[in-house]
Amino acid sequence: DTSREGLQSFVRPHLTEERFEHTVRVTQTAHELAEIYGGDSEKIEVAGMLHDYAKYRPEQEMARWIEESVDLSKDLLSYSPVLWHGPVGVKMIEKEWGALSKDVKTAIASHTTGNAHMSLYDKIIFLADYIEPGRSFPGVEETRELADRNLDEACLFALDNTIRFLMKKKQTIYPDTFHAYNALQRLQE
Ligand code: DGI
Ligand code: FE
Ligand code: FE
Ligand code: FE
């Protein structure tokens, strides 16, 4: 049931009220981006509403999914658990809700880091998660302005900002974050 009500009743019990409101704002922002850049509105709806589905699952449970799913990279286990809820979320949703299209799966799986070959849907969900109106951090306003004009440049700006932020905090950076940055940076050259 991909109606808003169907998606809400599936996802809501798994999220805090605050996270649920974030989810609705991400979906709204993603629809706005799709009006500019295109994309199927049902795919946008499902990916937006479900992107943080696994956000509050216990780390041990997420680690088990990574260990047991042949198509999830074991490398994730060597990086921050913050990165796990996208890829693991796809697995959990397919088990607990139903099959997802490839476009929706990839957009949910890579919403935190991006990836080397970002599709229209990957970019829209990644960016909507970054700029939804509840976000406030240095660089978000500039990213919002870019998002109105150029999807690739906005994603690149967000990735650049995220990499700098993580380096400043002496955190490790998942290779997909660099792959996404590199692929979009090459388009500028
Ligand atoms: O789940 P949300 O809070 O809505 O947002 P998200 O899934 O995009 O997670 C954002 C966090 O992920 C933010 O604190 C930065 C962090 N992050 C993004 N890329 C990387 C990363 N953290 C590490 N350690 N490495 C990364 O490559
Ligand atoms: Fe997330
Ligand atoms: Fe994000
Ligand atoms: Fe999110």
Image (cartoon, helix red, strand yellow):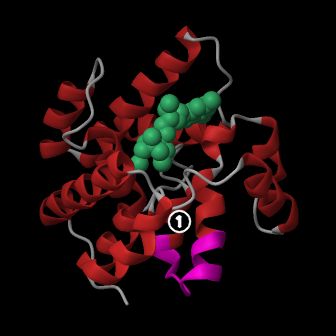
Q: Is residue 144 magenta?
A: no
- 141 on left or right of 72: left
| Residue found 21% across the figure and 68% down from its top | 38
Q: Quadrant of residue 77?
A: top right
Answer whether residue 181 is visible to the viewer in this image.
no
* Residue segment shown in magenta: 91-104
Q: Can you say whether 28 is above or below 187 in the image?
A: below
Q: Is residue 93 magenta?
A: yes
- Mark 1 close to ligand 2, CB under 8 Å: no
- 17 on left or right of 148: right
At label 1, counting other C-alpha atoms closer than 10 Å, the crowd grade (few under 14, some 14-19, many 20 or more) is many
Q: Can you say whether 182 is above or below 114 in the image?
A: above
Q: Position of residue 187 (x, y in %)?
A: 39, 41
Where, quadrant-wise, is the C terminus in this rendering? top left
Q: SS at mark 1?
A: helix
Q: Can you say whether 186 is above or below 84 in the image?
A: above
Residue that carries the numbered disc 1 in the rendered image = 106
Answer whether residue 147 is visible to the viewer in this image.
yes
- 80 on left or right of 4: right
